[in-house]
Image (cartoon, coloured by chain):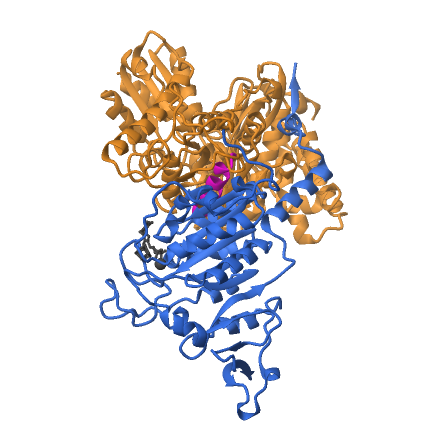
Chain colours: A blue, B orange
């Protein structure tokens, strides 16, 4: 017999979250590392195992729920945000995690993602961005760069890509972050922060597809890139990066620029200081524009707005307010209505 | 005068149609007339008929809005083929409705609107009221509602434009006089609606209504007054109800009876929006509603709610159903309970958004990829929507399946009296979730219903995955060829097994069979039953059967069909049920189609029946 023990006594560990099914991603796929990170994160969240629900769309990444030993729902292409909303609204006690791809979340499901983010239910969105359609074998995606040659763009893509973080900001997301499949520690930290945030958390995970888009993030997340081309955001700290941490980001008018400490009289006090809690979306939007190769790519929490009500709480409060005002609904009175008549 | 007042002519039933500009408040007066008639103890049936445009240019044919009501001392099953009295508030209303008024019918017109500009807008070159033929053919009653209303409201503090708007209630008051309707329900309506917020408006409408009624008293031409005695209702508490209201109440009742919270997601669309609006007001019943970003999302939200064990529902119309198809397939393969209401309207595409059609039976049957049968039930009248909501919930929860509940614009907007059920008489719909103390096999089936058990998030030890990929009994993804065939068959057999839970079909007419069976479904019930009833009293060998369950069909249907020489299937589509019946039972059923956005007339059905028998 399998029953859950009370939280305190039940020391969940990674193994509790490993499903019996064989994992069927290609050897070397970045998805393995993300799965690993989630399986390490979940036991540490203090949530009973039976309260986790993992929802996904369709794509290589969206096979994720099958590999998690939790309640899971592998839905249809692009529509997972709707199912996740339904789950969370129905039972606010649940910890809901949504796995989507760059095609699933930003192409076919872009509209649903937009509305999930603006409604702000407490759902954690993991967008696996490999800049390619993996499961359909290598067509370009809405995050592929202009000029990208794929099977469906033999002469190079002419679509201008969408920036997932800017999209999330434009959708009024209250928590926006980026991490990468190459950085286990950073993934776990980011997932924990997402869980702690009350409201929808949006995390772009730079993910490698070894088969159809190998090394697409290498310049940023590879061993060399990471020290020179990544910028790790820390609340209250200046935007510093580089192996020697002597480079930083300064704003000049409306534009960011890279400066080196000590050169031309630049000191730390000239640099932007990271504040993910500012309500002004211009700041995280500016961060979202920092991209390789002109700029280092930021990782961490871009935005973390506190205080906006979650959808499910707002709804629960309306229900409670209606009940306290009108009393608990009386079905017989509802059916009879106020204009009934009696036939003897 | 006293003589006129007393000279009531007693009649069995009457049909009144109010027609005017979309801004003239014709739906409102139609509703009030209906309420008043129901209050007077008559049986009623209504047909609101309005344009798709909210306010088409005033005075044009495109902007004409109408409301027809039949009321009587016998059982009234339809809003009536043609009006006995037509109220036309402007020339456009006259032009688009006059053809329906039979010779000798009462024609009440607002003369103030028959001015040059309005006549031109309606396409009249001369004033039709001056036409001798028209004056001879109908019982014409000419009243200047506009100035009489102004006069009646001379003391009112309302602005002149607001005063002018009260003329619809003046006209209503006049019709109340003609048909001896009580004023009280309408006076109460004014108080309830405006008494507190806009007392001047409540007062002005009260004055206008009474002035219209009194005018009847003093007018020569209204000397004919009609009296309709009470209809023989069974004893009990009654109310007037529309199909959409009944559906809302049925869903709330099903939620209570199943002890499952109601979660509803919808996207606005005619004629389903009142369900979203109605449920949104019932938060004190614990009903959670979400206005989704589109119908796909509504379906996904409802499915998410199903997964957590709620009674989940969405409602839409044809175009929205198109969008839901992929998700309905997912609900079918994951075997989760869900109710999808389709309030049908004229198609294809945007089609006739405010007109009626039995448009989507075949869509309900076949619009998904793969073999994905799902149960379909159809409501046959406004009040039947209540019972159908409960039946849909029973099927969904018991068999763990999405259910399509078909209603249509005609029964959704139309109203009839409803014997209010006693909550204590409603069926118990409770179905337990999987037992946490036992081993859980996700797709293991109950041998009699073939339904699986459902475990829900929060139940410890029963964690499992569902999804759109084919799976084996344990819930694991499986591409095994034999497994896929077995699963496909099991899903189909499960839906077919629902037929074993249905009561015997209720045939109207000759159980042993006869010349002709008229087979129908949905909102044509009233018209079919009325014409079959009439023809049977004339001695015709005709019976009728109205199907609620369209998938699966009742087990006794084949046997019933075989007892009749001919089967006639009238439908407001190109023959959708007919196709299903012909293919399933291999009989030469005769299809009778009408696709004009309007209900069947009893007369046209009767003619067709006689022609088919001969
Ligand atoms: C309605 C629909 N259209 C198309 C597909 C085919 N399809 C499956 S996955 C996919 C794209 C997946 O790309 P992405 O979301 O980036 O996920 P990845 O495989 O890269 O993880 C497509 C187009 C589908 N399953 N459903
Ligand atoms: S195709 Fe790419 S994304 Fe898909 S499993 Fe293989 S490596 Fe991973
Ligand atoms: Mg991808």
The x and y percentages for residue B293 are 48, 51
The x and y percentages for residue B401 are 41, 31
The x and y percentages for residue A294 are 42, 80
Q: Is residue B500 left or right of residue B425?
A: left
Q: Which span of residues is magenta-colored?
A: B296-309
Whether residue A7 is visible = yes
Whether residue B133 is visible = no
Q: Residue at x 37, y 31 (%)?
A: B374
Residue B54 in magenta stretch:
no
Report the number of numbered marks: 0
Quadrant holding the C terminus of chain A = top right
Q: Quadrant of residue A318?
A: top right
Q: Main secondary structure of the magenta part?
A: helix
Residue B124 or residue B270, whichever sits in front:
B270
Q: Residue at x 27, y 34 (%)?
A: B484
Q: Is residue A318 left or right of residue B512?
A: right
Residue B305 in magenta stretch:
yes
Q: Is residue B14 above or below residue A311?
A: above
């Amino acid at each position: 017999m399998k029953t859950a023990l009370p939280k305190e006594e039940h020391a969940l560990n990674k193994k509790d979250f490993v499903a019996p099914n064989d994992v069927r991603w290609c050897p070397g796929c970045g998805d393995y590392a993300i799965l690993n990170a989630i399986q390490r994160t979940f036991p540490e969240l203090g949530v009973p195992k039976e309260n986790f629900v993992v929802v996904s769309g369709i794509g290589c990444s969206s096979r994720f729920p099958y590999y998690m030993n939790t309640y899971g729902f592998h839905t249809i292409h692009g529509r997972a945000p709707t199912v996740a909303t339904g789950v969370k609204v129905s039972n606010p006690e649940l910890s809901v995690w949504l796995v989507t791809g760059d095609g699933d979340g930003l192409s076919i499901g872009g509209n649903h993602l937009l509305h999930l983010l603006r409604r702000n239910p407490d759902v954690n969105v993991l967008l696996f961005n490999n800049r390619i359609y993996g499961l359909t074998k290598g067509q370009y995606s809405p995050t592929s760069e202009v000029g990208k040659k794929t099977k469906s763009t033999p002469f190079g893509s002419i679509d201008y890509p969408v920036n997932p973080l800017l999209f999330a900001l434009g959708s009024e997301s209250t928590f926006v972050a980026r991490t990468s499949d190459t950085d286990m520690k950073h993934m776990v930290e980011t997932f924990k922060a997402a869980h702690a945030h009350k409201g929808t958390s949006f995390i772009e995970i730079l993910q490698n597809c070894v088969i159809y888009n190998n090394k697409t993030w290498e310049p940023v997340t590879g061993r060399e890139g990471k020290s020179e081309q990544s910028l790790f955001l820390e609340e209250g700290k200046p935007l510093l990066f580089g192996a020697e941490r002597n480079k930083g980001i300064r704003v000049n008018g409306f534009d960011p620029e890279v400066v080196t400490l000590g050169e031309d009289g630049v000191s730390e006090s000239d640099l932007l200081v990271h504040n993910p809690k500012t309500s002004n979306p211009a700041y995280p939007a500016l961060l979202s524009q920092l991209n390789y190769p002109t700029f280092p790519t930021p990782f961490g929490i871009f935005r973390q707005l506190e205080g906006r009500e979650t959808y499910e709480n707002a709804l629960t409060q309306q229900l409670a307010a209606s009940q306290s005002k009108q009393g608990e609904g009386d079905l017989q009175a509802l059916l009879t209505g106020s204009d009934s008549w009696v036939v003897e | 005068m006293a003589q006129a007042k007393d000279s009531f002519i007693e009649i069995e039933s009457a049909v009144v149609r109010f027609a005017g500009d979309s801004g003239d408040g014709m739906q409102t007066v139609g509703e009030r007339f209906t309420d008043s008639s129901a209050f007077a103890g008559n049986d009623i049936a209504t047909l609101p008929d309005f344009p798709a445009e909210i306010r088409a240019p005033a005075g044009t044919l495109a902007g004409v809005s109408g409301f027809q009501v039949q009321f009587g001392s016998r059982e009234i099953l339809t809003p009536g083929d043609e009006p006995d009295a037509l109220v036309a508030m402007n020339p456009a209303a006259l032009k688009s409705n006059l053809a329906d008024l039979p010779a000798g019918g009462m024609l009440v017109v607002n003369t103030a609107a028959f001015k040059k500009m309005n006549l031109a807008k309606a396409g009249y070159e001369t004033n039709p009221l001056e036409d001798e033929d028209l004056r001879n053919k109908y019982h014409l009653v000419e009243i200047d509602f506009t100035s009489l209303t102004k006069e009646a409201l001379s003391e009112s503090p309302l602005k002149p434009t607001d005063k002018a708007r009260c003329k619809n209630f003046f006209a209503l008051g006049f019709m109340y006089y003609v048909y001896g309707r009580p004023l009280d329900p309408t006076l109460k309506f004014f108080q309830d609606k405006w008494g507190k917020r806009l007392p001047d408006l409540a007062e002005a409408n009260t004055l206008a209504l009474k002035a219209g009624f009194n005018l009847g008293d003093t007018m020569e031409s209204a000397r004919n007054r009609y009296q309709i005695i009470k209809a023989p209702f069974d004893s009990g508490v009654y109310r007037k109800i529309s199909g959409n209201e009944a559906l809302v109440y049925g869903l709330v009742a099903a939620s209570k009876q199943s002890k499952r919270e109601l979660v509803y997601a919808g996207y606005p669309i005619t004629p389903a929006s009142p369900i979203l609006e109605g449920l949104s007001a019932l938060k004190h019943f614990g009903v959670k509603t979400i206005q989704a970003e589109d119908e796909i999302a509504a379906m996904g939200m409802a499915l998410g709610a199903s997964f957590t064990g709620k009674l989940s529902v969405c409602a839409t119309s044809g175009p929205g159903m198109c969008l839901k198809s992929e998700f309905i397939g997912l609900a079918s393969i994951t075997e989760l309970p869900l109710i999808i209401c389709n309030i049908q309207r004229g198609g294809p595409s945007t089609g006739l958004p405010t007109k009626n059609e039995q448009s989507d039976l075949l869509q309900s049957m076949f619009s998904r990829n793969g073999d994905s049968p799902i149960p379909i039930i159809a409501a046959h009248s406004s009040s039947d929507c209540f019972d159908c909501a409960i039946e849909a919930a029973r099927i969904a929860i018991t068999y763990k399946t999405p259910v399509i509940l078909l209603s249509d614009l005609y029964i959704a907007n139309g109203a009839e009296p409803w014997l209010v059920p006693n909550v204590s008489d409603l069926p118990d719909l409770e179905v337990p979730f999987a037992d946490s103390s036992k081993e859980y096999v996700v797709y293991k089936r109950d041998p009699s219903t073939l339904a699986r058990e459902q475990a829900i998030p929060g139940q410890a030890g029963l964690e499992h995955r569902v999804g759109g990929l084919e799976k084996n009994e344990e819930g694991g993804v499986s591409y095994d060829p034999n497994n896929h065939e077995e699963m496909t068959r099991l899903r189909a057999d499960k839906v077919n097994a629902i037929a074993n839970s249905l009561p015997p079909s209720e045939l109207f007419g000759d159980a042993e069979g006869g010349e002709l069976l008229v087979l129908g479904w949905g909102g044509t019930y009233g018209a079919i039953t009325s014409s079959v009833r009439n023809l049977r009293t004339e001695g015709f060998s005709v019976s009728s059967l109205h199907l609620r369950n369209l998938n699966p069909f009742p087990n006794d249907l084949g046997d019933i069909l075989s007892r009749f020489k001919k089967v006639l299937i009238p439908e407001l589509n190109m023959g959708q049920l007919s196709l299903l019946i012909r293919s399933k039972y291999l009989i030469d059923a005769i299809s009778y189609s009408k696709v004009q956005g309007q209900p069947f007339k009893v007369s046209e059905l009767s003619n067709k029946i006689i022609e088919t028998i001969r």
